[in-house]
Image: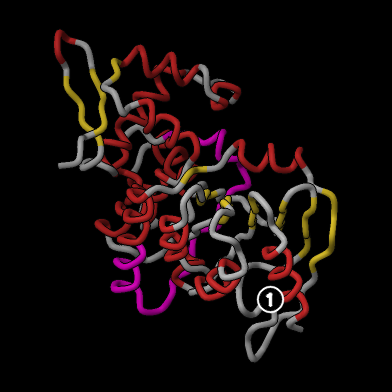
Amino acid sequence: MSEIGRQLEGFCKDSKNEILLVAPFIKVSALRRLFAQLSSNISVKCVTRWHLEDILAEVSDIEIWSLFAERQGSSLWLRSDLHAKYYRTGDRCLVGSANLTNAALGWSKHPNLELLISSPAMPSFELDLFSECVLVDQDLYEQTFKTVQLLKDACPAMPSAIEILDIPDFAWLPRLRNPKDLYIAYCGNETKLTTVSREAALTDLQLLPIPKGLDRQLFEVCVGTLLLHKPLIEKIDKFLENPQRFGAVTEFMRSLSCSQVEDFDADRSWQTLMRWLRYFLSDRYGLSIPNHSEVFYRVKKR
């Protein structure tokens, strides 16, 4: 059973310049064992996913971030719809079923039955892979870590998550105009909302994998964290590093992939998203209105 682990260790040891690791589930102990096989000059790019329910169930560790933060020239990326297991160095790759966990790689007492097979590199897959990824930085890690710790304290037993719709991240924009009403629908009280708000809220909830049974405060923390996991929000977040007027943001949104969505209205979409960002991430974003023109901005950390 440990043959797959030895295969991947040898793959790492043979790396000359860069290695790409792609797996939905990654455990610190397994990743550290692979890193031990890499020369210090090898940069590592890694793509995984951080679903809150996966982390709470301990099938994946967000603490892997520290290994990348310590390694020069390496980077960690998130893609929420990731299912592929793909490992490449140079023009060679391994593809199959094995995640980067001890059970998958045959390093546990009860290993999984997995496979990895050799294949030429797949540039088209990698192009698609990175087209909708979010780059992890210290801020994103801390936000996610804080949310996970709050969930652990509040939910000793892992709550199930709302079943999510199969809609790509690039197409997601919130629809509910009043973000405060989202919790009403989450609690099953959607009949208290207008028909338009009810339909919008239920659609938004089906696109955010939030554990059930949370109080309002923790629910809102989860929504804020999940917003930062969205590639579209990452692009807008970077754009807002310098304060931007309303028209500049709507013009920027027209240049993004969300504009391909049917019935896309940049003005309305930004009005709604701006409300969500101010409500769920109030410590991250600010709004000023000089000369009767809205200016939205990232709050500078002290």
- The question of residue 77 being in magenta is answered with no
Q: Residue shown at 55%/21% (left/top)?
A: 259
Q: Residue furthest bottom?
A: 109
In the rendered structure, the answer to whether residue 221 lies left or right of residue 263 reads: left
Find residue 292 and report its image quarter: top left
Q: Does residue 260 show up?
A: yes
Q: Residue furthest top?
A: 291
Find residue 257 and report its image quarter: top right
Residue 76 placement (x, y as % from top left): 51, 51
- The question of residue 164 being in magenta is answered with yes
In the rendered structure, the answer to whether residue 260 lies left or right of residue 93 reads: left
The amino acid type of the residue labelled 1 equals Leu
Q: Residue shown at 60%/63% (left/top)?
A: 38
Above or below, comparing residue 90 to residue 253 in the picture: below
Residue 9 placement (x, y as % from top left): 69, 70
Judged by its main secondary structure, the magenta piece is: loop
Q: Which residues are magenta?
A: 148-175
Q: Does residue 46 show up?
A: no
Above or below, comparing residue 38 to residue 102 in the picture: above
